Amino acid sequence: KSFLKLAEMDYSSLPIDITVECLLGSLLCCVAVLEGMSQYRDFRLTSELYSKKLDGVYNKQNFMIFNHRGSAL
């Protein structure tokens, strides 16, 4: 506003360059989000996993801990 007062310009609305920059930034963000979504896998279960319980699907040896603090009790 102070620049527009010094330049003796009317400041009833935003300058066109700020408006264009905001619209272009919003459009670019929307395009980036839509393009980034294509990299993710579909989360629906396939037919082979549909019949299994989720407890058995994520049961991996990396998460099995046999040396834990419960053995000291």
Image (cartoon, rainbow, N blue to C red):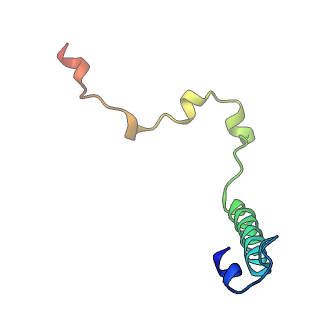
**On screen, 29 above or below 9?**
above
Give left or right: position of 60 versus 53. left
**Residue that appears at 75% across and 69% down:** 31
**On screen, 25 above or below 6?**
above
User: Measured from the top left, where is residue 35 in percent x and y?
Assistant: 73, 67
Q: How many marks?
A: 0
Give left or right: position of 35 versus 60. right
Give left or right: position of 23 versus 1. right
Q: Quadrant of the N terminus?
A: bottom right
**Residue that appears at 78% across and 77% down:** 20
Q: Which of these two is toward me, 65 or 19?
A: 19
Image-quadrant location for residue 7: bottom right
Q: Which of these two is toward me, 14 or 60?
A: 14
**Residue that appears at 78% across and 74% down:** 11
**Residue that appears at 67% across and 62% down:** 39
User: Measured from the top left, where is residue 33 in percent x and y?
Assistant: 71, 62
Q: Which of these two is toward me, 73 or 48?
A: 73
Q: Quadrant of the C terminus?
A: top left
Q: Which of these two is toward me, 55 or 7?
A: 7
User: Measured from the top left, where is residue 44 in percent x and y?
Assistant: 73, 42
Name the residue furthest left: 72
